[in-house]
Amino acid sequence: MDFTASSAQLLNIKADSLILPTGPQLKDSAQALDKSLDGAISSLIKAGDFSGRKSETLVMHIPGANGKRIILLGTEGATTNQQLIKVIRAGASALKKTPSAKAVWVGEGLSEDAEWEAGIIARSIQTASYKYSSGKKAKAQKLKTLTYWTGKKGSLAAAKKGLGYGSAVGNGMNTARQLGNLPANICTPSYLATQAKALAKGQAKVTTSVLNEAEMKKLKMGSLLSVSAGSDEPGKLIVIKYQGAKASVKPVVLVGKAVTFDSGGISLKPGRGMDEMKYDMCGGASVIGVINALIENQLPINVVGIIPAVENMPNGQATKPGDVVTSMSGQTIEVLNTDAEGRLILCDALTYVGRFKPDTVIDIATLTGAVIGALGKETAGLLSNDDQLAEDLLSSGLRSGDRAWRLPMYEEYDSLLKSNFADIANIGGPQAGTITAACFLGRFTKKYKWAHLDVAGTAWVSGAQKGSTGRPVPILMDYLRSKAVKSKAG
């Protein structure tokens, strides 16, 4: 997909589709287009065929123009970033339903920020283009080129920058979606390791290494290995380094939970909906998606991606409820529930990241069902030991439309993790499950600034539209881009 920006005469740009954002009152370019079409657009509005309300779309064909069309995109009532993003998604979806090969998006009537708007448009076009591939050769995309048009020549550079960034984020989301959607008999820990190595091939800024179980045993990662013990699939610790800045610049470390299938182990899950537990690796998939986007966008920042990858299965070697394991940090853990396994692999990974002397650490995990009870399927849970880091992530969520909500980590919650037989229990009881899970991880992150994103509600959707969403790639990329900009300014 090619994305370009132009300020040339709108009607002179060669395209077979034109996306026109407008409310019920035509302004500027919409008025000019209406006039050139002898009032065809205003006539549709007067007749009630198009009201201009937010996210409404209507495809109108231009008489005598050999199949060329205008997609009217309603904007009335869209004022917040989230509302504008929904409008843009609706436009992208309407465009993809047409046989258009070349399209023009009129960058007028939505946001005053051309870079942001162009970025969301490119991202939405890329994600609307995604189709699950099971290994068969995918059909060629009909849409080849999208031109973002602005009447302000001074906005062209910003628009081009936004298009490049948004396209990279969209491709990163699609990478994460594809990995998440693969069945667990294909997307194993070894498969993820292979994909991570392939990502680094031919990339001077990227290196990938993979620790096997023998190497993890030498590092005394007893907590992580207690989860993989029940599976015939060996666990992996995948390390991806992206160096976009000087080696002296401390990296941001992203730690993504990758349980490629979660049966619950001995604490077996109910059978209904268990097929969706292939999505329990979406945290790790999002890290790979972010690295993919960083490569494409070439952000000047250092990032280390850590992906602990395991299967959680109930064989004769599996960890049992009541077993005590020793983590890499030396802390002992009483495993009261083997279905609370994500924190068991993350805690060793979070200890391991200390060797990279990180600037900040963010872990991403489909960790608790409790976060869905608290926030539903729209918003990720955010917990952190650093207020500024939390605020930065919340701001990135609002800009990107990939929103999060901060939950507390009071000492009273941490006390629920007490164990009579170990330093800590892996669950804290039926109350505040998302918070106690983060408190558990907090025991292993005291030496650096850390945030935890619980994406159990946002990483995939169920039902007829079942599939991975590619979240939280947008919030993570916005955070990294903002950090790169601040670093350059400093």
Image: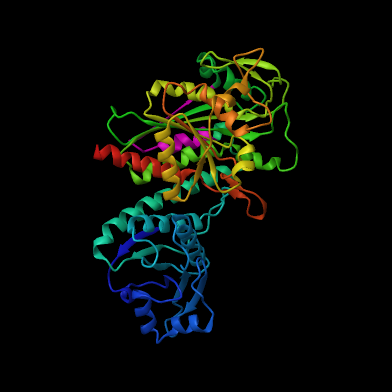
Q: Please say if 334 is above or below 144.
A: above
Q: Position of residue 255 (x, y in %)?
A: 48, 31
Can residue 169 be seen here? The reply is yes
**Residue 367 appears in which quarter of the rendering?**
top right
Most foreground residue, 215 or 264: 264
Is residue 185 visible from the viewing direction of this image? no
**Range of magenta residues:** 192-212
* Image coords of residue 397 (percent x, y): 45, 46
Query: Farthest right residue?
Result: 271
Q: 315 left or right of 482?
A: right
Residue under the point 53% across and 24% down? 347
Tell which residue pokes out farthest to the bottom in this image. Answer: 38
User: Where is residue 459 shown, x and y percent of the image?
Assistant: 56, 44
- Residue 412, located in which quarter of the rendered image? top right
Quadrant showing the C terminus = top left
- As drawn, is 315 to the left or to the right of 71? right
- At x 45% / y 72%, what residue is drawn? 23
Q: How many marks?
A: 0
How far across and how far down the image is residue 164, in percent? 35, 52
Tell whether position 184 is magenta. Answer: no
**Residue at 71 percent of width and 21 percent of height:** 321
> Where the N terminus falls, by quadrant?
bottom left
Is residue 210 rendered magenta in the image? yes
Of residue 31 and residue 241, the one placed in the foreground of this image is 31
